[in-house]
Amino acid sequence: MSQVITVGFITEGTTDVRFLNSIIRRTFDDLTWECQQAIDVYPPTALTISKIGLTFSEYVLEAARAAEDDKLMVLCVHTDADDESDTNTFAHRISPAFADVETCTDAVCKNLVAIVPVRMTEAWMLADKEALKAEIGTDKTDAQLGLIRPPESIADPKETIKDAIRLAFDHRSRRSRNQASISDLYEPLGATVRLERLALLPSYQKFQEAVREAFRRLNYLH
């Protein structure tokens, strides 16, 4: 008989939900093979928590309460590093917020997992350039699309993807070019980007290790 795991998550923005929903599900599922027993990963639940008037720590605490109310076993917390390193984000946002949840005496989900892409979520969308080009619908080379730098070294990955879309369709009419949009890529890329390519990024490796720790807290992994 297999065990189950239920996962909730909060994100920095609405577009992040569309990409990370599948990434979270696939990553948890991918790492179940390391566990000592069969585990069914239920579809993640995107929690809707108002951020108005809340600090980041208060926002995470409210999400932890909601996760507990929904009987979720793990809460993933996404925030972009918005920098070339995630050091400040962990020091000044993730660690204090997680500490507040840990010491909270209310009923809250304390099995927390951080998701902190260096720069922003769109860097993870650049991890698998073949998947990106397939979703854009182009057979141009990485160089022709300006996709030659490591994803986490790019200052603005979102603009890099927008530029790649523009370069992919620069031979078309202006009307056709306007039909392509980065907003169309988040959900399909979340499902198709290869995890082994994502695993080349240090920020994703930290997410994987945090998922392993979540499994350990549930006694699914030793």
Image: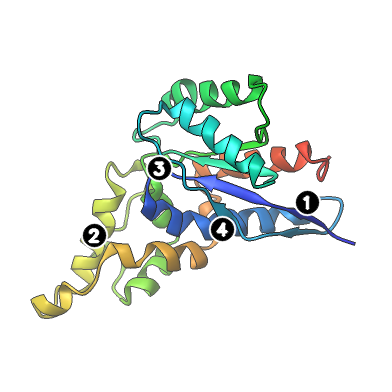
In this rendering, the label closer to the viewer, 4 or 3: 3
Query: Could you tell me the amino acid type at mark 4?
Result: Leu
Label pair 4/2, CB-CB below 8 angstroms: no
Residue for badge 2: 162
Q: Quadrant of residue 87?
A: top left
Q: Considering the numbered disc 1 on the image, is that residue within a helix, a strand or a loop?
A: helix
- Indicate the amino acid at tag 2: Lys
> Between disc 4 and disc 1, whose residue precedes?
1
* Residue at screen point 33% across, 50% down: 149
Q: Which residue is found at the position 23% from the left and 59% from the top?
A: 162
CA separation in Å, label 4 and label 2: 23 Å
Comes first in the chain, label 4 or label 2: 2
Whichever of labels 4 and 3 marks the residue nearer the N terminus, that label is 3
Any mark on residue 42, and which?
Answer: none
Please indicate, yes or no, whether residue 197 appears anywhere in the rendered image. Answer: no
Query: Residue at point 59% right, 36% down?
Result: 64
Of marks 3 and 2, which one's residue comes earlier in the chain?
A: 3
Instruction: Please give the residue where the numbered disc 1 appears in the rendered image.
Output: 34
Question: Which of the two discs, 1 and 3, labels the residue nearer the N terminus?
Answer: 3
Q: Quadrant of the N terminus?
A: bottom right
Which amino acid type is shown beneath numbered disc 3?
Glu
Q: Quick check: can you spot residue 199? A: yes
Callout 1: few (<14), some (14-19), or many (20+) C-alpha neighbours within 10 Å?
A: few
Q: Nearer the viewer, residue 39 or 195?
A: 39
Q: Residue 137, percent across and down?
A: 32, 77
Q: In the rendered view, would you say 117 is above or below 16?
A: above
